[in-house]
Image (cartoon, rainbow, N blue to C red):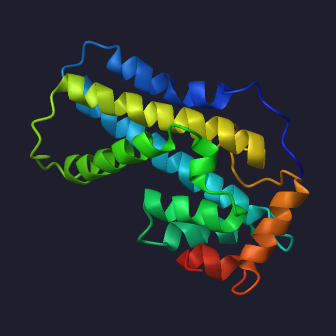
Amino acid sequence: MTAKKEEPMNRGFEGEFAAVDLLIGSECGSRGVDGFCLAWIKLERQLRKIAANLIYQASDVTARDAGKLREALYGHGNLDYNSFIGAINHLSGIPVSDLVGDRYRPLKKEIGACYRNRLKIFHGQQTGQSLDREALLARIASVREWCQLLSLGAADRFGYDGFAGNTSLFKTDRPDIIDAVDKALQRRGWLAYAQTFQR
């Protein structure tokens, strides 16, 4: 596949979070916890799609390899948001902190707290923090800001924001990214990396 047609800035992000907005704007009694869960899914999905897009930039990956890449990611049973952050850093040579910008440090701290809450909430457990709706809405706001800033930074540096379009598996035709990915995958190859996410 060749480079994707550019979408208006942040259209992918806005579309992705439209469902979250509908949910938290509803009268549903569980809108805080439900909105938080959906927002977290959006965050992890964005990170996964950016990482997958970067792997796809490898010179030796072609459209015929898309199924193998999807299968490798599907078969990997132990990926979380930190795995994808590490993969983005490793593959591109650009830290996620650079993509998110000045708000990275406080947002990363918030995202870490969100992740600990997510581990409990997704398994139907108590967080031990008595999070009320307002606290959960604040968590959603942090996730949203993180995703929006990452979206802008990734679109600028990689040509893909993790949200736009139906697939992340397309070539962005950015020589600097191709070189960085090829260098990062040189020792193990793209498939072995996708199967393990170990350098």
Residue 43 lies, in percent from the top left, at 47, 44
Above or below, 105 against 76 in this view is above
Q: Is residue 100 left or right of residue 37?
A: right
Whether residue 166 is visible, yes or no, is no
Decide: is 4 above or below 73: above
Name the image quarter holding the N terminus. bottom right
Q: Which of 75/20 is in front?
A: 20
Q: Is residue 144 visible?
A: yes
Q: Residue at x 59, y 72 (%)?
A: 72
- Screen quadrant of the C terminus: bottom right
- Identify the residue at image location x=52%, y=66%: 74
Position of residue 125 measured from the top left corner of the image (x, y, whole percent): 13, 50
- Measuring 64% from the left and 82% from the top, which residue is drawn there? 192
Q: Position of residue 12 (x, y in %)?
A: 64, 31
> Hey, which residue is sitting farthest bottom in the picture?
187
Camera-side residue of 173 and 20: 173
Residue 24 appears left or right of 45: left
Residue at point 42% right, 71% down? Answer: 77
Q: Quadrant of residue 11?
A: top right
73 is higher (above) or lower (below) than 168: below
Judge by depth and name the residue closer to the eye, 189 or 86.
Answer: 86
Residue 91 position, x and y percent, is: 68, 66
Please tell me how many numbered marks the rendered image carries. 0
